Image (cartoon, rainbow, N blue to C red):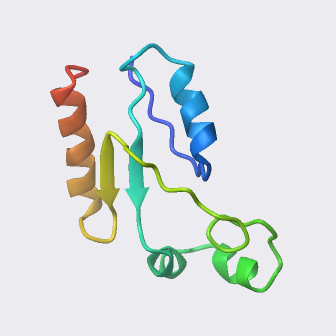
Amino acid sequence: MITLVSFISPFRSERRMAREMLPEGEFLEVFVDAPLAVCEQRDPKGLYKKARAGEIPNFTGIGSSYEPPEAPELHLRSDQASPEELAGQVIGLLEARGML
């Protein structure tokens, strides 16, 4: 069974804790990366604008820091490739690891 979990996890310690909950080699960290300016441009709910206005405290990237992964299994640059290309990279990683 393969489970993909997509969420904001701004702190390395939390990601390390998630990795440690699984057997060795079962946790693959995929860093979906985009510059802050791109995230703000893509924001359909206007959350970044609200955070910059002080309406949302501790918003990751604005009022709270983000600690990028130091050694993710896969680093996806979402501002440099299409969603289809990025999905292909994820599938390629799973295939290379013998998970597919």
| Snapshot quadrant of residue 77 | bottom left
Position of 100 with respect to 7 (left or right) is: left
Q: Quadrant of the C terminus?
A: top left
Q: Position of residue 69 (x, y in %)?
A: 45, 49
- Residue at 19 percent across and 20 percent down: it is 98
Position of 77 with respect to 31 (left or right) is: left
- Residue at 40 percent across and 55 percent down: it is 32
Pick whichever, 23 or 100, lies toward us: 23
- Residue at 81 percent across and 69 percent down: it is 57
Q: Position of residue 22 (x, y in %)?
A: 50, 17
Q: Position of residue 42 (x, y in %)?
A: 48, 75
> In the rendered image of this protein, does residue 52 appear above or below residue 87?
below
Position of 20 with respect to 45 (left or right) is: left
| Snapshot quadrant of residue 30 | top left
Q: Quadrant of the N terminus?
A: top left
Pick whichever, 16 or 84, lies toward us: 16
> In the rendered image of this protein, does residue 38 appear above or below residue 12?
below
- Residue at 82 percent across and 81 percent down: it is 54
